[in-house]
Amino acid sequence: DWFGVQCTNDDVVELKLANNNVSGTVALSGDCLGKLNIFDLSQNLIQKIDSNIGLLENLSVLDLSGNLLQNISSDLSTMTDLIELDLSRNNISGSISDELSAMTNLGKLNLTYNDLTGISSSIVALKKLRSFEMYHNENMGRIPLEVIDFLQNLLTKDEQKVSEKLRSLVKNSDQEYFVRSIPNQAFEWIVKQSSAFVLDDKSLAQQYCLSVLYFNSNGKYWTNKTDWLQSRDECDWYGVQCPNDDVVELKLANNNVSGTVALSGDCLGKLNLFDLSQNSIQKIDSNIGLLENLTVLDLSGNKLENIPSQLGLLENLTVLDLSGNKLENIPSQLGLLTKLSFLWLHENPNLAGRIPSEVAKLMMRNDKINASETILSNVPVSRSTIFEYGTSQFRAFNDILYRYRMQQDEIRLNSTYFVDQYILETLYFVTNGNRWNQNDKWLTSANHCTWYGVECNTDGEVIIFDFFNNNVTGTLPKEFGDLRKLSYLGFDGNSLRGSIVSEIGQLTNLELIYLHDNAFTGSIPSELGLLTGLTSLDLHSKTLSGPIPKELGQLTNLEYLYLHENNLDGTIPSALCNNSGCALCNNSFGIDIVIDCLQVEECACCDCY
């Protein structure tokens, strides 16, 4: 009378406790249930099976699906009369053990949705097996050929016919794809499809490969799956484009594609463009390396942590977008992509260190617009960082390449464009430009001369940079010293820290420098003395220290020099008192100098603060 217990002649023959919150260990005592024929414990929380289960010598059906088991008990092998065994949807890992081969009467075995990594060839000893399912074991290794042949024998005549046809059409593929057990439901679906429609060889192969992609990437949850696996012609399926009946473009961007991008062999050998951007893909199958005609591959905006080294086999690839993922490394094999012109790796926060040298050399060698050569020849200070993951220089360089690809018909291909925009973008990334008070048009398709705070001459060269009180944080990049035409530099009223980079001394066209009211530390760089055209220099900030460089005496055109509210010492170069250019100064020396008289030795032409 107990729930789930069924008896015949007072013998317990069935025990059905499915979905009953059974947990812990299934333990028995001796052979006191020797007549038990059906034992259903599916959809529970069972973690372990006691060894005494092997004493159930008359058991024919055992259902342990949907539990928390982590291994297959070797004691199951003593149950030689077992006909059906369901271990699907557990956490079973490792290889399918040899012990199962002792269950010689087994006719049905289900191991789907586990973490199995291999299968022993001893499984072929199960001569009575008629149903064997093991799909959705994502890390399953290569299946032994004898097991594949064994699985072929489980097919119906119609299934065998389709399997043989696929073997002849889809080259370079693991044969396990052409059996019912794996992967997913693709083979079963193509058998039904070929029975419902008359498919020529090309369509049969292409539909099979597309269905492999569909099932592995959770196609039923795609945002748009119009006609997928429904219509006779795969060229009608959403995102598929087929000139001359060959699948040449596959566009599934922003479509809730997830899981694994798996393909089967080279049955999509004509594919030219594959766009899977802005999805939730976690893994790319190694067979992607068989897409020998692929020229554009967009995997941006996904959840990839690794990419297969087989991407290096895509010898015709010209564009590869891996930006916006969770990549932890880049395989050096990408250096084999001799036709690659655009490689985007930005917004991968887990990348660290330098790009493999093979990849960096490739990027420079195949840079059709010579952006890398132009930038590095004009901004040599970036040579050590432009190919290092995560740096502002790397992000700026990648953004420029991306921008060129998106608007290549409009972009101005000259060194000024690349150099000035590269420097500005480096500043943006190093100083958290997304948090500035004003960043209008920055990193948009608009010409950089129209970006907030930037003004250019008629040749498109940056001459004025005015960022007063704009919530600029971080450090001033050394690259700023290569804005060679800059005449006005204004960062006053921000939160810049670190040192005032000496590279500013390269800006020989500078007339006005306003760096006051920041958090700069260290000393005043002596290289500022090279800016002989300078008329105004304001560095008051409360944070600078050290001696006043004697080189400032070379600034013969200087009219205003504000060094107060610092911790400076030394003296003002006497040569500055001989200037005569300041018409509005409060003294007769022609220059307005404000210093902290308690720290700095007084000079005749200075005003004390």
Image (cartoon, rainbow, N blue to C red):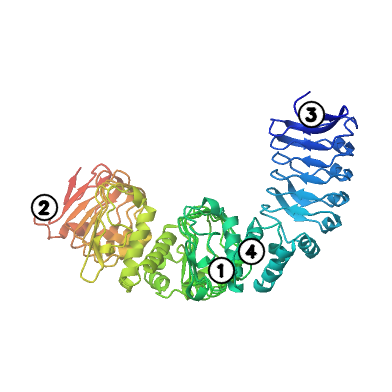
Task: Give the percent coordinates (x, y) of residue 62.
Answer: 79, 40
Q: CA distance from mark 4 to mark 2?
A: 95 Å
* Marks 3 and 1, the one that precedes in the sequence: 3
594 or 32, which lies in front? 32
Q: Which mark is residue 585?
A: 2
Sequence-first tag of 2 and 3: 3
At a point 27% along the width and 50% down the height, the residue shown is 438
Which one is in front, 431 or 230? Answer: 230
Residue highlighted by disc 4: 195
| Mark closer to the chain start, 2 or 1 | 1
Res. 606 mark:
none
Specify whether 272 is left or right of 540. Answer: right
Identified by mark 4, the residue type is Ser
Which mark is first along the chain, 2 or 4?
4
The residue at 41%/70% (across/down) is: 376
Q: Who comes first in sequence, dot 4 or dot 3?
A: 3
Q: Amino acid at mark 3?
A: Val
Distance in Å between CA atoms under marks 4 and 3: 44 Å
Residue with the mark numbered 3: 5
